[in-house]
Image (cartoon, rainbow, N blue to C red):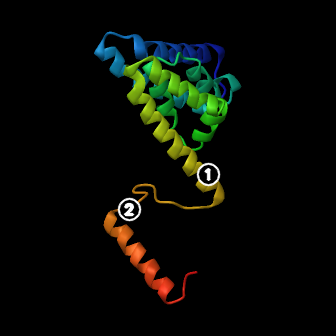
Amino acid sequence: LVLDADLECFVKDCLSVALSTWSNSSSRQVSSAVPGLFKSVISVMRTSTTESMSIDAVILRVLEQPTNRKGRYIALEALLKDKAVGAKLFDLGGGSALIQSFIEGISDSESVARPIADLMGKLLCSVREEMNAKAGIGVDLSNPAGSKKDRRKREKQLARDREQGHVE
Protein backbone atom coordinates (compact mmCIF):
# COMPACT_ATOMS: atom_id res chain seq x y z
CA LEU A 1 0.00 0.00 0.00
CA VAL A 2 1.44 3.33 -1.06
CA LEU A 3 0.06 6.20 0.98
CA ASP A 4 -0.51 9.54 -0.64
CA ALA A 5 1.50 12.46 0.70
CA ASP A 6 -1.36 13.92 2.75
CA LEU A 7 -2.16 10.64 4.48
CA GLU A 8 1.53 9.95 5.11
CA CYS A 9 1.91 13.41 6.65
CA PHE A 10 -1.19 12.83 8.79
CA VAL A 11 0.11 9.47 10.06
CA LYS A 12 3.49 10.96 10.91
CA ASP A 13 1.78 13.83 12.73
CA CYS A 14 -0.31 11.31 14.70
CA LEU A 15 2.88 9.48 15.64
CA SER A 16 4.45 12.74 16.83
CA VAL A 17 1.34 13.60 18.85
CA ALA A 18 1.28 10.14 20.42
CA LEU A 19 4.94 10.29 21.40
CA SER A 20 4.82 13.82 22.79
CA THR A 21 1.51 13.34 24.60
CA TRP A 22 2.35 10.03 26.24
CA SER A 23 4.53 11.61 28.89
CA ASN A 24 3.32 15.18 28.93
CA SER A 25 -0.41 14.93 29.38
CA SER A 26 -1.94 15.94 32.67
CA SER A 27 -5.26 14.40 31.62
CA ARG A 28 -5.88 10.74 32.38
CA GLN A 29 -8.36 10.50 29.52
CA VAL A 30 -5.84 11.78 27.01
CA SER A 31 -3.10 9.53 28.40
CA SER A 32 -5.37 6.49 28.18
CA ALA A 33 -6.25 7.27 24.54
CA VAL A 34 -2.63 7.51 23.38
CA PRO A 35 -1.86 3.74 23.29
CA GLY A 36 -4.85 3.21 20.98
CA LEU A 37 -3.68 6.04 18.74
CA PHE A 38 -0.17 4.59 18.65
CA LYS A 39 -1.46 1.10 17.76
CA SER A 40 -3.57 2.57 14.96
CA VAL A 41 -0.59 4.49 13.58
CA ILE A 42 1.53 1.35 13.68
CA SER A 43 -1.12 -0.73 11.91
CA VAL A 44 -1.32 1.85 9.09
CA MET A 45 2.46 2.01 8.87
CA ARG A 46 2.74 -1.79 8.63
CA THR A 47 0.63 -1.75 5.48
CA SER A 48 2.69 0.97 3.82
CA THR A 49 5.49 0.22 1.39
CA THR A 50 6.97 3.69 1.79
CA GLU A 51 10.41 3.54 3.42
CA SER A 52 9.76 6.60 5.57
CA MET A 53 6.71 4.79 7.00
CA SER A 54 8.46 1.50 7.82
CA ILE A 55 8.61 -0.06 11.28
CA ASP A 56 12.35 0.70 11.22
CA ALA A 57 11.49 4.40 10.83
CA VAL A 58 9.07 4.18 13.76
CA ILE A 59 11.66 2.45 15.94
CA LEU A 60 14.23 5.12 15.13
CA ARG A 61 11.69 7.87 15.80
CA VAL A 62 10.81 6.36 19.18
CA LEU A 63 14.48 5.92 20.07
CA GLU A 64 14.98 9.66 19.46
CA GLN A 65 12.75 10.37 22.46
CA PRO A 66 14.57 11.49 25.62
CA THR A 67 15.50 8.66 27.98
CA ASN A 68 13.41 10.13 30.79
CA ARG A 69 10.16 9.87 28.79
CA LYS A 70 7.88 7.05 29.88
CA GLY A 71 6.21 7.00 26.46
CA ARG A 72 9.50 6.00 24.84
CA TYR A 73 9.49 2.68 26.66
CA ILE A 74 5.77 2.02 26.38
CA ALA A 75 5.97 2.62 22.62
CA LEU A 76 8.98 0.31 22.23
CA GLU A 77 7.19 -2.35 24.26
CA ALA A 78 4.14 -2.03 21.99
CA LEU A 79 6.39 -2.51 18.96
CA LEU A 80 7.82 -5.70 20.48
CA LYS A 81 4.46 -7.41 20.08
CA ASP A 82 5.42 -7.97 16.45
CA LYS A 83 7.58 -10.95 15.68
CA ALA A 84 11.13 -10.15 14.58
CA VAL A 85 11.15 -6.65 16.07
CA GLY A 86 13.34 -7.49 19.08
CA ALA A 87 16.56 -8.03 17.15
CA LYS A 88 15.73 -5.12 14.86
CA LEU A 89 15.21 -2.85 17.88
CA PHE A 90 18.47 -4.05 19.39
CA ASP A 91 20.33 -3.44 16.11
CA LEU A 92 18.77 -0.05 15.37
CA GLY A 93 19.33 1.01 18.97
CA GLY A 94 23.04 0.30 18.72
CA GLY A 95 23.18 -2.89 20.81
CA SER A 96 24.95 -2.05 24.03
CA ALA A 97 24.20 1.66 23.47
CA LEU A 98 20.50 0.78 23.70
CA ILE A 99 21.02 -0.98 27.02
CA GLN A 100 23.11 1.99 28.20
CA SER A 101 20.23 4.34 27.31
CA PHE A 102 17.91 2.14 29.40
CA ILE A 103 20.27 2.41 32.37
CA GLU A 104 20.48 6.18 31.89
CA GLY A 105 16.70 6.35 31.80
CA ILE A 106 16.46 4.48 35.09
CA SER A 107 19.05 6.73 36.73
CA ASP A 108 17.45 9.93 35.34
CA SER A 109 13.97 9.31 36.67
CA GLU A 110 12.38 6.85 39.06
CA SER A 111 9.06 7.27 37.26
CA VAL A 112 10.35 5.41 34.21
CA ALA A 113 12.21 2.64 36.04
CA ARG A 114 9.30 0.17 35.91
CA PRO A 115 8.48 0.65 32.18
CA ILE A 116 12.18 0.30 31.36
CA ALA A 117 12.52 -2.88 33.40
CA ASP A 118 9.40 -4.31 31.72
CA LEU A 119 10.75 -3.39 28.29
CA MET A 120 14.18 -4.88 28.98
CA GLY A 121 12.65 -8.20 30.05
CA LYS A 122 10.37 -8.33 27.01
CA LEU A 123 13.20 -7.31 24.68
CA LEU A 124 15.42 -10.11 25.95
CA CYS A 125 12.58 -12.64 25.61
CA SER A 126 11.83 -11.40 22.09
CA VAL A 127 15.46 -11.64 21.00
CA ARG A 128 15.73 -15.12 22.55
CA GLU A 129 12.59 -16.26 20.70
CA GLU A 130 13.95 -14.89 17.43
CA MET A 131 17.31 -16.63 17.97
CA ASN A 132 15.56 -19.91 18.80
CA ALA A 133 13.36 -19.60 15.71
CA LYS A 134 16.39 -18.97 13.48
CA ALA A 135 18.09 -22.00 15.00
CA GLY A 136 14.95 -24.10 14.51
CA ILE A 137 14.47 -24.60 18.22
CA GLY A 138 10.88 -24.72 19.39
CA VAL A 139 10.60 -23.59 22.99
CA ASP A 140 7.47 -23.24 25.09
CA LEU A 141 8.06 -19.91 26.80
CA SER A 142 4.78 -19.84 28.68
CA ASN A 143 6.56 -21.42 31.67
CA PRO A 144 10.26 -21.57 30.76
CA ALA A 145 11.50 -23.25 33.90
CA GLY A 146 8.38 -25.28 34.59
CA SER A 147 7.08 -25.96 38.04
CA LYS A 148 9.25 -27.45 40.77
CA LYS A 149 7.32 -30.68 40.40
CA ASP A 150 8.04 -30.82 36.65
CA ARG A 151 11.74 -30.09 37.21
CA ARG A 152 11.98 -32.85 39.82
CA LYS A 153 10.35 -35.31 37.44
CA ARG A 154 12.81 -34.37 34.68
CA GLU A 155 15.75 -34.68 37.09
CA LYS A 156 14.59 -38.10 38.30
CA GLN A 157 14.06 -39.29 34.73
CA LEU A 158 17.50 -38.02 33.73
CA ALA A 159 19.07 -39.81 36.73
CA ARG A 160 17.28 -43.06 35.79
CA ASP A 161 18.41 -42.72 32.18
CA ARG A 162 22.01 -42.19 33.32
CA GLU A 163 21.85 -45.24 35.60
CA GLN A 164 20.58 -47.31 32.69
CA GLY A 165 23.31 -45.98 30.42
CA HIS A 166 20.95 -44.13 28.07
CA VAL A 167 22.55 -40.72 28.67
CA GLU A 168 26.22 -39.88 28.83
Instruction: Give the residue type that dot 1 points to.
Output: Met
How packed is label 1: few (under 14 Cα within 10 Å), some, or many (20 or more)? Answer: some
> Can you see residue 71?
no
Sequence order check: which comes first, mark 1 or mark 2? 1
Residue 45 x, y percent position in the rendering: 58, 28
Image coordinates for residue 167, horizontal then vertical, percent: 55, 82
Q: Position of residue 160 (x, y in %)?
A: 44, 84
The kind of secondary structure element at disc 2 is: loop
Element under disc 1 = helix
In this rendering, the answer to whether 140 lies above or below 116 is below
**Residue at 59%, 55% in the rendered image:** 132
Residue 60 appears in which quarter of the rendering?
top right
**Residue 60 or residue 97, whichever sits in front:** 97
Q: Is residue 1 above or below residue 16?
A: below
At 67% from the left and 22% from the top, the residue drawn is: 52
**Disc 2 residue type?**
Gly
Q: Is residue 51 above or below residue 118?
A: above
Q: Is residue 102 left or right of residue 154?
A: right
Do labels 1 and 2 touch, CB within 8 Å? no
Q: Nearer the viewer, residue 33 or 94?
A: 94
For mark 1, what is the residue?
A: 131
Tell me residue 84's x, y (percent).
Answer: 60, 43
* Residue underneath mark 2: 146
- Circle 2 Cα neighbour tier, 10 Å, few/some/many (<14 / 14–19 / ≥20): few
Name which residue lies at 47% across and 40% down.
Answer: 122
